[in-house]
């Protein structure tokens, strides 16, 4: 019990600190594995990623959310694109890889005179089937 309370308090303090210190507006969208999933998958397995949205400070009602993938060689390219609305609390996307490796994704959220704000990247690991 003490361990879970401590972990929850630590996670809250860390989230608040990161949001307050981040010049990129990381609080607007945070990517993580879907509930019940890890960040490691076997080849051909579907990975589900969720982006939690906090659009409460926006004065506009419609936003573009671009999911970018870091390609070999180091450049970010568009992987998916969504439209979110001020009342939206999350977006989600899935991917399936057929090659072993670590794949990075980030989200960029923007709208008319809003942003762009870039999330921290998430890494999805794919390993060979046993």
Image (cartoon, rainbow, N blue to C red):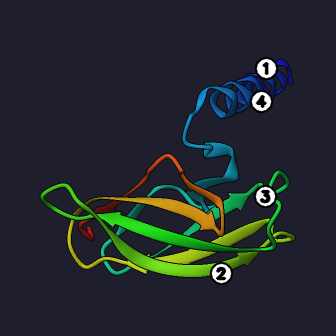
In this view, the mark in front (1 or 4): 4
In the displayed structure, 91 sits above or below 35; it is below
Spatial separation of the CA atoms under disc 1 and disc 4: 10 Å
Spatial separation of the CA atoms under disc 4 and disc 3: 19 Å
Which type of secondary structure does the marked residue at label 4 adopt?
A: helix
First in sequence: mark 1 vs mark 3: 1
Residue 113 place in picture, x, y as percent? 65, 62
According to the image, label 1 marks what residue? 6
Q: Which image quarter: residue 126?
A: bottom left
The answer to whether 75 appears left or right of 121 in the picture is: left
Q: Name the residue rendered at 39%, 77% in the picture.
A: 79
Residue 12 is labelled as: 4
According to the image, label 2 marks what residue? 83
Which type of secondary structure does the marked residue at label 1 adopt?
A: helix
According to the image, label 3 marks what residue? 55
Q: Name the residue rendered at 70%, 58% in the picture.
A: 52
First in sequence: mark 4 vs mark 2: 4
Quarter of the picture containing the N terminus is top right
In the displayed structure, 17 sits above or below 64; it is above
Q: Nearer the viewer, residue 14 or 34?
A: 14
In this view, the mark in front (4 or 3): 3
Which type of secondary structure does the marked residue at label 3 adopt?
A: loop
How many residues crowd around disc 2 within 10 Å: few (fewer than 14), some, or many (20 or more)?
some
How many residues crowd around disc 3 within 10 Å: few (fewer than 14), some, or many (20 or more)?
many
Residue 98 place in picture, x, y as percent? 25, 79
First in sequence: mark 2 vs mark 1: 1
In this view, the mark in front (1 or 3): 3
Q: Nearer the viewer, residue 130 or 5?
A: 5
First in sequence: mark 4 vs mark 3: 4
In this view, the mark in front (4 or 2): 2
Which type of secondary structure does the marked residue at label 2 adopt?
A: strand
């Amino acid at each position: 019990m003490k361990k879970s309370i401590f972990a929850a308090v630590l996670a809250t303090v860390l989230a608040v600190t990161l949001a307050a210190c981040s010049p990129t507006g990381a609080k607007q969208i945070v990517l993580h594995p879907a509930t019940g999933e890890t960040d490691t998958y076997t080849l051909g397995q579907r990975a589900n990623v969720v982006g939690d949205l906090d659009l409460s400070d926006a004065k506009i009602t419609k936003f573009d959310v671009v999911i970018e993938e870091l390609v070999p060689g180091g450049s970010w390219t568009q992987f998916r694109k969504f439209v979110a609305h001020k009342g939206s609390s999350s977006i989600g996307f899935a991917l399936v890889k057929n090659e072993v490796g670590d794949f990075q994704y980030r989200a960029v959220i923007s709208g008319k005179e809003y942003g762009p704000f870039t999330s921290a990247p998430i890494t999805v690991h794919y390993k060979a089937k046993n």
